[in-house]
Image (tube, helix red, strand yellow):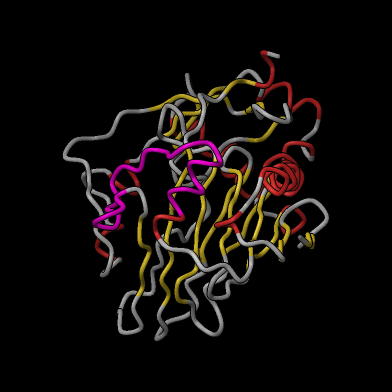
Amino acid sequence: MEIRPITQNLGAEIRGIDLTSMDAEAHTTIEEAFSRYLVLCFREQKLEPGDMVELASRFGGLGETPYLSGLEDYPDVVPVIKEAFEKSHHTFGSGWHTDFTFQTCPPARTLLYAVDVPSKGGDTLFANLQEAYEALSQGMKENLSKLRAIHSATRSYGPDASLKDHLENMVITNEDKEPELQSHPVIRKHPVTMKPSLWINPTYTIGFEGMTEQESQPLLEYLNNLIVEERFRCKVVWTKGTLAMWDNRCTQHSASSDYAGHRREMWRVTTAGETPINFANG
């Protein structure tokens, strides 16, 4: 097994392993690399939906996936499809976000497998929330450690959300009523490495607890712009048969929509996560 870093602090490509026959030693090596690089790309895999379920089980157990429809025989495996003939330029997953932070226990990891990809474009960008935290001043770290953020699915899956209208070949269900709000610490402690992360995102984080939307927005805008600075990012260039696995507890990501006229099909599955814990609580 060969591990090639994509950048110094985020992302690595792994070659020379068949994930369907991963033994205990390989699993340990992968977990060590995962804690180090947060985003892993396994090249030249040949996976079926059942393999995706098995991998999610081995890497922590299946997570809950609301709003999105999975494959008929594998409901936990969500097909992310954009056909070449679609008129909309939107891609599912475009726009910076961390998966499903509106949940009480958001996913620990997301696994995404490339079934069919365009010859160019359709890449995914990732940002390291641990490095973004470390870039903050000590005063800002102390102030943010006292805050909790409010997360909601309303922009993507609320009654007035238009996401589903732009995705012609995906089945997405909207809420009939405004979805419940979820409060999470702004600075999250990683349950494995114990490292702190700046844990907000522009898709699901709508404000700070105890503050109005008007008061929250300037700080949210500053932090979200900081997170996606190039120094904290890496890019995954997809090839058919690539499986990417990323740590949803300390990254953001955004899918590119630059492949109009070309087909892209991915399979997505998440693993069960934990209730986020404030880093300041020790």
As for residue 69 lying within the magenta part, the answer is yes
Say whether residue 33 is left or right of residue 21. right
Identify whether 232 is placed above or below 158.
Answer: below
Q: Which residues are magenta?
A: 52-75
Residue 151 falls in image quadrant:
top left
The spot of residue 105 in percent (x, y) is: 45, 29
* Image quarter (top left, top right, bottom left or bottom right) of the C terminus: top right
Q: Residue lying farthest top?
A: 281
The spot of residue 269 in percent (x, y) is: 43, 50
Residue 185 falls in image quadrant:
top right
Q: Residue at x 65, y 35 (%)?
A: 198
Secondary structure that dominates the magenta span: loop
* Image quarter (top left, top right, bottom left or bottom right) of the N terminus: bottom right
Q: Residue at x 46, y 24 (%)?
A: 183
Say whether residue 57 is left or right of residue 242. left
As for residue 77 lying within the magenta part, the answer is no
The spot of residue 259 in percent (x, y) is: 47, 80
In front of the other: 219 or 35: 35
Q: Count the marks.
A: 0
Identify whether 181 is placed above or below 249.
Answer: above
Identify whether 277 is placed above or below 213.
Answer: above
In front of the other: 268 or 129: 268
Does residue 226 appear in the picture of this structure? no
Q: Residue at x 73, y 21 (%)?
A: 142
Say whether residue 49 is left or right of residue 60. left
Identify whether 39 is placed above or below 106.
Answer: below
The spot of residue 44 in percent (x, y) is: 61, 71
Does residue 220 appear in the picture of this structure? yes
